[in-house]
Image (cartoon, rainbow, N blue to C red):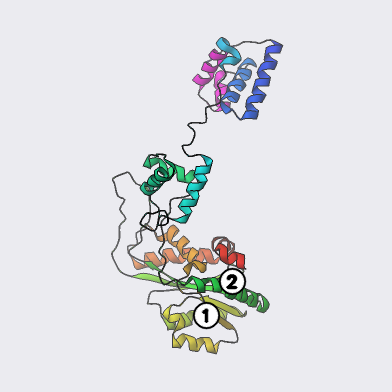
Amino acid sequence: MCCLRFTMSASYRKAVEQQLKTAQHLGNLRQVKYLLAIFAVMDGHSCAQVAGVLRVHEKTVIKWLGVFCCYGLQGAPRQKPPGRPPKLTPTQQAALTSLLDEGPVKAGFSGACWRSPMIQQLIYDRFGVFYNVFYIAQLLKNLGFSFQKAAFVSDHLDEAKRQAWRTTTWPQILRRAKERKALLLFGDEASFPQWGTLTYTWARRGQQPKVKTCGKRKGYKVFGLIDYFTGQFFYQGQEGRLNSTAYIAFLRRVLEQTSHPIILIQDGAKYHTSAETKAFFAQQIARLEVCQLPAYSPDYNPIEKLWKKIKQQDTHLHYFPTFEALTEKVEQALLKFTNAPEEILALCSLPTELAQAA
């Protein structure tokens, strides 16, 4: 146990106090702890007590006292150097960010998305600077990028129609919904397979993680609607195939649950636009207005984020030995969101271009 005691002159104590203030101002935590330890021991506290308060090892406090006795303030720990300066200058980093935003094709590479070796080559070609490929990830994080799984985009996507929908159609829909005090429901369907789904996970290098699967090609199908204004969530799950009859039955139940007029925004699935479904829409025209999303635009439908969240939390990397185990798990998740409209509103925000148009 440390039992060292010592004193210092008033003038020297004042110098030490001034050094402590300077260290605190500069954020030099190592030096702050060092000087606080000196004062605490000098005021009669044991090394063990000081170590506990400062959250350092008792041997560290003893070492600090020895250094102070030999060297005084000259022995105070200095601020750690900031490390090697970045190889790319701030101007070059900004230029690299712009090149990465433009995509690999414009930079002369093949492939739709960037990979680390491509970025390594790009930096060397454009700036004459060589980075180890293993450091590229840290560089990209520093520039505000993150490692993500790419998503497919249809080559049939019509950007002109998407722009017309977000700049003209969507503001009109939103205005009518407010004028009619209607529920503005975004609708979609999801399928949760019993055989399971895989995603990224952590494992030891060279040891691929395994997830048991029953191998049965069955799935739990869910119709869903969320209200843009309140986050209210309607859903209906079933084992059978999704079709017009099941879709109409779901919409009838939703109409029975509310007295408000409804504006329904849906995609172009066959059972959304079949003759049977259109006939039902015609019958409900007094209360139900139907609007179509532009083709191949799931990113304009906020309920897609809800399906993604449920799959991430409740079905990815899970083993379902029976169909009942799957349905119970999915129903629990659906019920949770039914009772959490605020969470749905926070989760299912519109993409920036639609939010700005609103």
Q: Residue at x 53, y 89 (%)?
A: 282
The residue located at (49%, 74%) in the rendering is: 294
Main SS type for the magenta part? helix
Please tell me in which quadrant of the rendered image residue 131 appears. Answer: top left
Residue that carries the numbered disc 2 in the rendered image: 167
* Residue 205 in the image, given as x and y percentages of width and height: 31, 44
Q: Nearer the viewer, residue 88 or 329?
A: 88
Callout 1 amino acid: Arg
Q: Nearer the viewer, residue 16 or 344?
A: 16
Q: Amino acid at mark 2?
A: Thr
* Horizontal and vertical percent position of residue 324: 37, 67
Q: Is residue 331 magenta?
A: no
Looking at the rendering, the stretch of residues picked out in magenta corresponds to 45-68
SS for tag 2? helix
Position of 220 with respect to 36 (left or right) is left
State whether residue 154 is above or below residue 31.
below
Give the camera-side residue of 189 and 298: 298
Q: Nearer the viewer, mark 1 or mark 2?
A: 2
Residue 56 shows in this picture: yes
Q: Is residue 103 left or right of residue 225?
A: left
| C-alpha separation, residue under disc 1 versus residue under disc 2 | 33 Å
- What residue sits right under mark 1 in the picture? 253
Residue 31 image offset from top left, x and y in percent: 58, 23
310 to 72, vertically: above or below: below
Of helix, strand and loop, which one carries label 1? Answer: helix
| Res 349 visible | no
Sequence-wise, the earlier of marks 1 and 2 is: 2
> Which residue is painted at 59% across and 65% down in the image?
355
Task: Tell me the crowding category of disc 2: few under 14, some 14 to 19, or many 20 or more residues within 10 angstroms, Cα based.
Answer: some
Residue 259 percent location from the top left of the image: 62, 80
